[in-house]
Every structure is written in structure tokens, then in C-alpha cells.
Amino acid sequence: MALTQSNMMELGTKAPDFTLFDTVSKKQISLSQLKSNTATVVTFICNHCPFVHHINHKFVEVANEYQAKGIQFIAISSNDVEYFPEDGPEMMTHVAQSLNYSFPYLYDETQTVAKAYQAECTPDFFVFDDNLKLAYRGRFDESRPNMGSASGRDLTNALDAMLNNKDIAKVQYPSIGCSIKWK
């Protein structure tokens, strides 16, 4: 596995719009349909990455907890499925069902959305405010596979600050994971 850091898109950047295939509902869904009036979390993940495996169960817990508070979660896979067939739509559906994803798991076949978001790795997190302006980007937490349990601390601290109308910490750390598998 190639260890890659996220690119750290500039805070305040407007979320690039998209319409992608949701492997859960089997429908085309746009960001404008999904966005929350509180906050929207867009994360780039995939099925095969050990960094995603490491956080996946905790990520689902965090998503369930914060969706109940009005925050929308969206997961996107952008990997080249020719070389990584386990990241294809059918397997995405299987993973979403087996892990009880309560959020859309979108397939970015052309990789246009990953490029627009400057996503570099899986997992890679982007949190947008009610106006879809970037408020947080980077890691889920400081843990790594075989190095502690996933807590979601960095992401949940940012979400709690947003919910309480407080400033999000300006020091934000890049996510580290597997590189997106580009075509």
C-alpha cells in the first residue's frame, strides 16, 4: 500500500457540485439533493483500503450519531475498478449493506469528483457548512491500522464545533491512507 496524505483544500472553498450513482438506492443523486442545512460531510473511501477498514465501523457510528443531529454524510469511491474490481459498484453495494451504511455510497466512475475535491487518499474527509463552504478537511483521527483504535476525534471535534456555533480549530491534520487509484 502506498501511504498518501490528503491535499488539504483551502478552507472556505465552495463544495464542487456533482451528480453520481448511489450504489445503495441505485439512483443518480446530486450534492444539492443531499446537502444539509447544518453541515455536510463528504468522504472519499473505497472497499479495499486497510486505512478505511481500520475506521469503517467507527465511521458508521459517527455518521449515525451526527445524522441524528442534522448533519448529512456522503461517501464516494473514485478508484479505477479495472485494476481494483473489489471497489466496483456491486461490491460497494455489498459493503454498504454489510456495514449498515446509513448514508449514500456514491460511485465516481470518471474520477471527476475526486479531482474537483482534490482528494488524494482514502479515507479523505471534507466538512462543509450550511452554505457548502469548506470548514474542515483532513483526517478522521490520529489512529492508523495496527496503531490504536479509531475514535473519530478530529472529525467529531469539528462537527461539535459547528453544531455549537464555535470556531473549528485552525490546525487541521491531513488524512493519511491509500492513494486514490487513478486511471
Image (tube, rainbow, N blue to C red):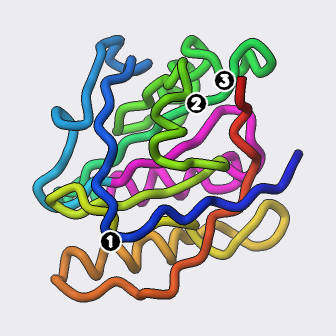
User: Could you tell me residue 120's position as x and y percent?
Assistant: 64, 49
**Between discs 3 and 2, the one toward the N terminus:** 2
**Badge 1 is on which residue?**
159
Q: Is residue 38 magenta?
A: no
Residue at the (20%, 75%) spot, across then down: 163
Mark 2–mark 1 Cα distance, whole angstroms, equals: 25 Å
Q: Give the residues drawn in magenta, as a range.
A: 41-65
- Mark 3–mark 1 Cα distance, whole angstroms, equals 28 Å
Which residue is painted at 32% across and 71% down in the image? 159
Dot 3 or dot 1: first in sequence order is 3
Name the element at disc 2: loop
Mark 3 — residue?
87
Q: x and y percent of residue 45 in the render? A: 58, 41
Q: Is residue 51 left or right of residue 45?
A: right
Q: In the displayed orientation, state which residue is furthest to the left.
A: 37
Count neighbours of disc 2 (C-alpha within 10 A) and say few if under 14, some if 14 to 19, many if 20 or more.
many
Q: Is residue 10 above or below residue 114?
A: below
Residue 63 on image: x %, y %:
38, 53
